Image (cartoon, rainbow, N blue to C red):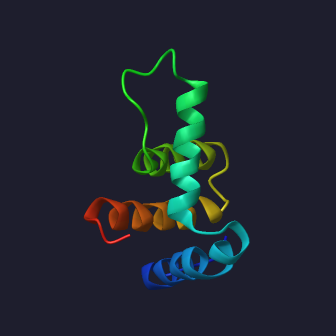
Amino acid sequence: MVKMTRAEALQKAEQLINGARAKTHGNAEDTHDSLAKVMNVLWRKKLKEDLVGEDMYVFLIALKLIRDSQNSKNMDNPIDTIGYGALWAEKKSGKS
């Protein structure tokens, strides 16, 4: 297992969400807002209210926690969780 300090983990997550993944996947807020729209269509009969982009961060963090329970050696899981948490905090604060 790769040893990593908390500062290195935060830096890695920041590099991904503002660098490589932003270039590959586009604007995170736009992506997650679009995902919420698709989920609303798919789950329209089961939802009491519409999902929004902010809900997708919670969903994706939950996904990473489940994946980590299945393979705890994969360092992508905690790094991605940090990244989603940062994006979620930004969205929640209204700074995005």
Q: Position of residue 96 (x, y in %)?
A: 38, 69
Residue drawn at (51%, 51%), measured in percent from left and top?
Answer: 33
Is residue 78 in sight in this rendering? no
Is 80 on the left or on the right of 21, as rendered? left
Q: Out of 91 and 2, give the one closest to the viewer.
A: 91
Q: Out of 6 and 49, give the one closest to the viewer.
A: 49
Q: Position of residue 49 (x, y in %)?
A: 37, 27
Task: Count how many numbered circles sit on residues in the image.
Answer: 0
Task: Name which quarter of the figure residue 35 lies in.
Answer: top right
Residue sitting farthest toward the right: 24
| Image quadrant where one finds the N terminus | bottom right
Residue drawn at (26%, 65%), measured in percent from left and top?
Answer: 93
Is 56 on the left or on the right of 74, as rendered? left
Q: Out of 85 and 41, give the one closest to the viewer.
A: 41
Residue drawn at (44%, 78%), measured in percent from left and top?
Answer: 6
Is residue 82 in sight in this rendering? yes
* Vertical relation: 18 (above or below) 38: below
Residue sitting farthest toward the left: 93
Task: Name which quarter of the figure residue 85 lies in.
Answer: bottom left
* Vertical relation: 20 (above or below) 91: below
* Vertical relation: 3 (above or below) 65: below
Q: Position of residue 10 (x, y in %)?
A: 46, 78
Is 18 on the left or on the right of 2, as rendered? left
Q: Out of 46 and 68, give the one closest to the viewer.
A: 46
Q: Position of residue 17 (x, y in %)?
A: 56, 74
Task: Name which quarter of the figure residue 42 lies in.
Answer: top right
Residue drawn at (30%, 59%), measured in percent from left and top?
Answer: 92
